[in-house]
Image (cartoon, helix red, strand yellow):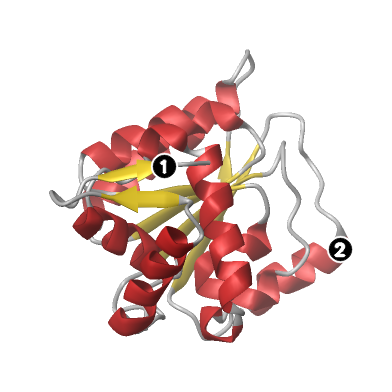
Amino acid sequence: MENPRRTNYIFVDFENTQVHDIGLISGKPVILLLVMGEKQKQLPIPLIKQLLAHADQVGLIEANCAGKNALDFVLAFHVGQWAKQDPTGYFHIVSKDKGFDPLITHLKQLKVSAARHDEFAQIPVFVDHQKIPVTDKITLLTERFTTHAKNRPAKRDSLLAYIHSTFAKQLAESEVAGLVKQLEQRKLININENNKVSYCL
């Protein structure tokens, strides 16, 4: 299971992605930060009620500046600030803007856990991965390998760690090893005698 002491910091690009289900954070190790653009002066009443109900877990970051990608730079700055304070945290950016992907790659190179998600509800901490059928897990992994081709694990050990991370460390080691075997049996990957992984997608 996910380490209960590890905090998930979720930064929502509110110009790009809306959040309707803030109740998902209840009882979870989550800090939710909505990053608001200069022109976003009002919030829907239902959202305000949800924010107030979880006031100890949420915050607002106002990007009071104009210009191309202004909000993106503000968001990136705050991710860096929080990562400095808690380097063991898991940092999530909720945005459909793939322009954040280089930032995610850079954070990973610095050994900081980070990911971008198109939708708030897709974040692993909100999903019970133990209930997902094996076939759906294989499909999810295949999609991630295809979408994030540059970040594919090159060795078997790093592939095991990648799968653990993908499913929020909710799976037993035996199940993770079983998923690797399934990927091989379906000829989606090949692992040679040096434990080097090649992809057949």
The residue labelled by disc 2 is 45
Residue visible at 55% across and 26% down in the picture: 99
Q: Secondary structure at mark 1?
A: strand
Q: Nearer the viewer, mark 1 or mark 2?
A: 1
Q: Position of residue 131 (x, y in %)?
A: 59, 86
Q: Residues within 10 Å of mark 2 (few under 14, many from 20)?
A: few
User: Callout 2, which amino acid?
Assistant: Ile
Q: Position of residue 24 (x, y in %)?
A: 64, 76
Q: 85 or 174, which is in the foreground?
A: 174
Cβ atoms at labels 1 and 2 below 8 Å apart: no
- Residue 57 appears in the picture as rendered: no
Classify 17 as above or below 31: above
User: Callout 1, which amino acid?
Assistant: Tyr
Instruction: Pick out the residue farthest to the left.
Output: 194
Classify 61 as above or below 30: above
The number of callouts visible is: 2
Q: Secondary structure at mark 2?
A: helix
Q: Is residue 181 left or right of residue 25?
A: left
Classify 38 as above or below 47: above
Q: 195 or 109, which is in the foreground?
A: 195
For residue 46, the mark is none
Q: Is residue 28 left or right of residue 103?
A: right
Q: Residues within 10 Å of mark 1 (few under 14, many from 20)?
A: some
Instruction: Pick out the residue farthest to the right.
Output: 45
Residue visible at 57% across and 22% down in the picture: 70
Instruction: Pick out the residue farthest to the top.
Output: 67
Q: Position of residue 179 (x, y in %)?
A: 42, 70
Q: Is residue 55 left or right of residue 74?
A: right
- Residue 108 appears in the picture as rendered: yes
CA gap, disc 1 to disc 2? 48 Å
The residue labelled by disc 1 is 199
Task: Pick whichever of labels 1 and 2 is earlier in the sequence.
Answer: 2
